[in-house]
Image (spheres, rainbow, N blue to C red):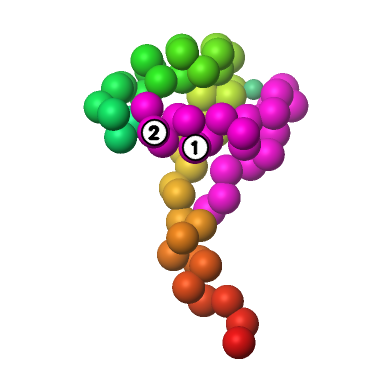
Amino acid sequence: MIIPIRCFSCGKPLAHLWQDYLSHIKAGKTPKKAMDELGVERYCCRSVFLGNADLADIIGRFRKG
Ligand SMILES: [Zn+2]
């Protein structure tokens, strides 16, 4: 789905980092390196990135009308 705006556990805002994270991954970096560079340090926040399935584009095809 869409990345949660904030980390569920600690409340750190994360959604603004998602596109940067994806571009790091596309550039061939490991998730660890990408999250280190974005300043996502706590493992609760890291789990939000690692556990998120990016379905926003797929779901967007099923809009009304
Ligand atoms: Zn967190």
Front one among 24 and 10? 24
| The residue positioned farthest toward the bottom in the image shown | 65
SS of the residue under disc 1: helix
- Residue 29 position in % (x across, y down): 29, 22
Q: Does the magenta run of residues contain 12? A: yes
Q: Quadrant of ligand 1?
A: top right
- Given residues 18 and 52, the one toward you in this image is 18
Does residue 59 appear left or right of residue 30 in this picture? right
- Residue 7 is marked as none
Residue in the image at 57% along x and 43% along y: 3
Measured along the vertical axis of the image, is residue 44 above or below residue 64?
Answer: above
Instruction: State which region is magenta.
Output: 1-24
| Magenta highlight on residue 17 | yes
Tell me, yes or no, if residue 8 can be seen here: no
Residue 10 seen: yes
Give the side of residue 64 with respect to residue 62, left or right: right
Left or right position of 56 against 64: left
Marker disc for residue 19: 1
Q: Check disc 2 and report its element: helix, strand or loop.
A: helix
Please name the residue that numbered disc 2 is placed on. 23
Residue kind at label 2, given as amino acid type: Ser
Q: In which quarter of the image is the C terminus?
A: bottom right
Residue 12: image x %, image y %? 70, 24
